Image (cartoon, rainbow, N blue to C red):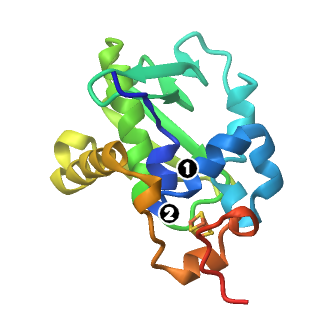
């Protein structure tokens, strides 16, 4: 069996496939040392979830590990309300709903459904301005669902030895630029 794909990689891969390797090396703990403020925004609000402090309701699952066999994904959910079927992914500040964010919540959604839960609403919540962004369920948005599957297919066949970056702007703003042998950063 192929090694499972981390759900967080569904976001990182879109930014740059090589960044997955550094993410795996530094992990979530050390990653904070390398993150720019902008990138931290995407993960900061998970602190409460990881400490299991968001809600004490027995109907709310928080920070639990998940596995999706259909797409061979592993990861964690942020918050899932069993009673309402609402899956919520909180981020510190959302300025744009990136495809990577959607891929992550789709992965979480499929894993929860495999566990027998009904997911009928997906929300990306922006912590700093208290905004909710309602995301189409995968079965209701073919374009987003196809994109989710395409990224997984691309990850499964990706080979770092054939990788060539093409976007210098990404390298210029990349947190791993100092340590990345593929960097195109302009000096
Ligand atoms: S420096 Fe460039 S090639 Fe390296 S991980 Fe960052 S974006 Fe990718």
**Residue 30 shown left or right of residue 112 in the figure:** right
- Looking at the rendering, in which quadrant would you find the C terminus? bottom right
The answer to whether the residue bearing label 2 lies less than 8 angstroms from the nearest atom of ligand 1 is yes
For the residue carrying disc 1, how many other residues have a C-alpha within 10 Å: few (<14), some (14-19), or many (20+)? many
Labelled disc at residue 32: none
**Residue 88 shown left or right of residue 150 in the figure:** right
Residue 133 in the image: x percent, y percent?
A: 45, 53
Q: CA distance from mark 2 to mark 1?
A: 9 Å
**Residue 122 shown left or right of residue 42 in the figure:** left
- Looking at the rendering, in which quadrant would you find the N terminus? top left
Q: Is residue 93 visible?
A: yes
Q: Which residue shows up at 47% across the image and 21% down it?
A: 66
Instruction: Determine whether the residue tagged by mark 1 lies in a helix, strand or loop.
Output: helix
Instruction: Determine whether the residue tagged by mark 2 lies in a helix, strand or loop.
Output: helix
Q: Which residue shows up at 48% across the image and 23% down it?
A: 81
For the residue carrying disc 2, how many other residues have a C-alpha within 10 Å: few (<14), some (14-19), or many (20+)? some
Residue 118 in the image: x percent, y percent?
A: 31, 20
Residue with the mark numbered 1: 20
Labelled disc at residue 15: 2
**Residue 154 shown left or right of residue 48 in the figure:** left
Q: Is residue 133 visible?
A: no
């Amino acid at each position: 069996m192929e090694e499972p794909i981390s759900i967080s990689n569904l976001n990182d891969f879109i930014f740059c496939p090589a960044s997955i390797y550094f993410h795996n090396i530094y992990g979530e703990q050390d990653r904070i040392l390398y993150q720019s403020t902008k990138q931290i925004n995407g993960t900061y609000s998970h602190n409460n979830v990881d400490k299991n402090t968001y809600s004490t309701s027995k109907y709310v699952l928080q920070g639990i590990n998940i596995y999706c066999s259909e797409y061979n994904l592993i990861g964690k959910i942020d918050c899932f309300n069993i009673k309402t079927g609402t899956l919520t992914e909180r981020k510190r500040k959302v300025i744009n709903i990136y495809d990577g964010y959607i891929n992550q919540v789709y992965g979480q959604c499929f894993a929860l459904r495999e566990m027998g839960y009904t997911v009928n609403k997906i929300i990306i919540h922006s912590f700093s301005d208290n905004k909710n962004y309602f995301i189409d369920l995968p079965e209701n948005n073919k374009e987003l669902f196809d994109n989710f599957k395409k990224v997984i297919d691309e990850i499964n066949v990706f080979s770092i030895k054939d990788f060539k970056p093409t976007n210098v702007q990404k390298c210029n703003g990349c947190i791993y630029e100092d340590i990345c042998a593929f960097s195109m950063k302009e000096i």
